[in-house]
């Protein structure tokens, strides 16, 4: 069978960080902008997009956005690294993730990467803290572009170079827990496996027309059947 490239979202798909990410991002926003990061739904959004929505809600002039965004993201990365250095039993892998990644990493038909709204630095901090960073040599990150739908081609090109496989979009699966993940897959011409392991139930995810939907990744046999199709 053709080799598959499987691009994973991070938050609520692979991991639950017990709110560490948004807690640190809000802290950075408060310190840099002297305002609260409120009224933003972060699920599936890139970190820069979250900040820009917050800047707009705080009525901060757009001419200041680029500098404030850069300062916020730098401070956020520092705050997250410090928070993740302190153990928290609330942070954990989502159901089925550990055996799935171990199986896929050993499969001759699969190659793994990321497609995430996190910056690369913070993505790797999160994954490293839970022991799974080594599974993901490449990816598309919010530090590449704030528009999530532009990240699929970035991840695809990096995977082609790293794995030396001329992947085509039809060989790619995007695994995520929000409509934004599904939209990013469609923008790439790839297929989406949606998982209701975050805030969005199966019926709501189905409205975005993924190729497959599961409650979570705990049924290894079922997940592998889908990804090999």
Image (tube, helix red, strand yellow):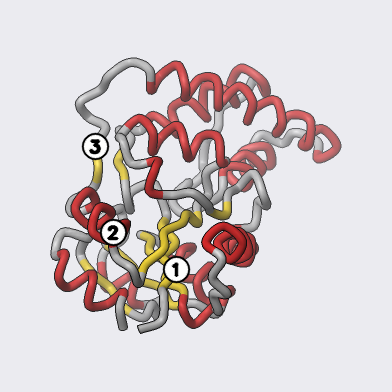
**Residue 187, picture quadrant:** bottom right
| Residue 42: % across, % down | 47, 46
Camera-side residue: 40 or 118? 118
Mark toward the viewer: 2 or 3:
2
Which residue has dot 1 on it? 5
Instruction: Kindly identify which residue carries mark 2.
Output: 106
- The label number, if any, that marks residue 37 in the structure image: none
Label 1 sits on a secondary structure element that is strand
- Left or right? Give the position of 171 relative to 47: left
Residue at left offset 55%, top offset 26%: 77
> Which residue is more in the foreground, 138 or 37?
138
How many C-alpha atoms fall within 10 Å of the one at disc 1: few (<14), some, or many (≥20)? many
Quick check: 197 left or right of 84? left
> Which quadrant is home to the N terminus?
bottom left
The alpha-carbon separation of the residues under discs 2 and 3 comes to 23 Å
Sequence-wise, the earlier of marks 3 and 1 is 1
Q: Residue at x 48, y 40 (%)?
A: 123
Q: Is residue 160 left or right of residue 190?
A: right
Count of all numbered marks drawn on residues in the image: 3
Q: From the viewer's perspective, is the residue at label 2 or at label 1 nearer?
A: 2
Tell me the SS state at disc 2: helix
Mark 2 or mark 3: whose residue is earlier in sequence: 3
The local secondary structure at tag 3 comes to strand
**Mark 3 sits on what residue?**
92
Q: CA distance from mark 3 to mark 1?
A: 25 Å
**Compared to 45, does 107 lie above or below?**
below
Give the image location of residue 190, x and y in percent.
49, 77
Decide which of 179, 3 is in the foreground and name it. Answer: 3
Query: Could you tell me which quadrant the C terminus lies in?
Result: bottom left
């Amino acid at each position: 069978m053709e080799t598959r490239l499987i691009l994973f979202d991070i938050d609520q798909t692979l991991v639950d960080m017990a709110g560490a990410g948004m807690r640190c991002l809000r802290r950075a926003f408060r310190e840099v902008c002297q305002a609260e990061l409120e009224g933003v739904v972060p699920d599936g959004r890139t970190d820069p997009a979250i900040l820009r929505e917050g800047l707009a809600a705080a009525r901060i002039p757009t001419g200041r956005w680029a500098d404030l965004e850069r300062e916020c993201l730098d401070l956020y990365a520092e705050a997250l690294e410090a928070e993740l250095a302190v153990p928290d039993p609330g942070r954990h892998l989502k159901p089925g993730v550990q055996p799935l990644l171990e199986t896929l990493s050993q499969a001759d038909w699969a190659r793994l990467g990321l497609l995430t709204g996190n910056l690369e630095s913070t993505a790797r901090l999160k994954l490293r803290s839970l022991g799974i960073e080594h599974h993901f040599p490449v990816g598309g990150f919010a530090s590449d572009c704030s528009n999530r739908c532009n990240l699929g081609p970035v991840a695809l090109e990096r995977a082609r170079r790293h794995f030396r496989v001329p992947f085509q979009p039809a060989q790619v699966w995007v695994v995520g827990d929000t409509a934004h993940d599904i939209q990013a897959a469609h923008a790439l011409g790839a297929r989406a496996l949606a998982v209701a392991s975050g805030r969005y139930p199966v019926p709501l995810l189905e409205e975005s027309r993924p190729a497959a939907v599961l409650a979570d990744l705990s049924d290894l046999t079922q997940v592998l059947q889908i990804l090999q199709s």
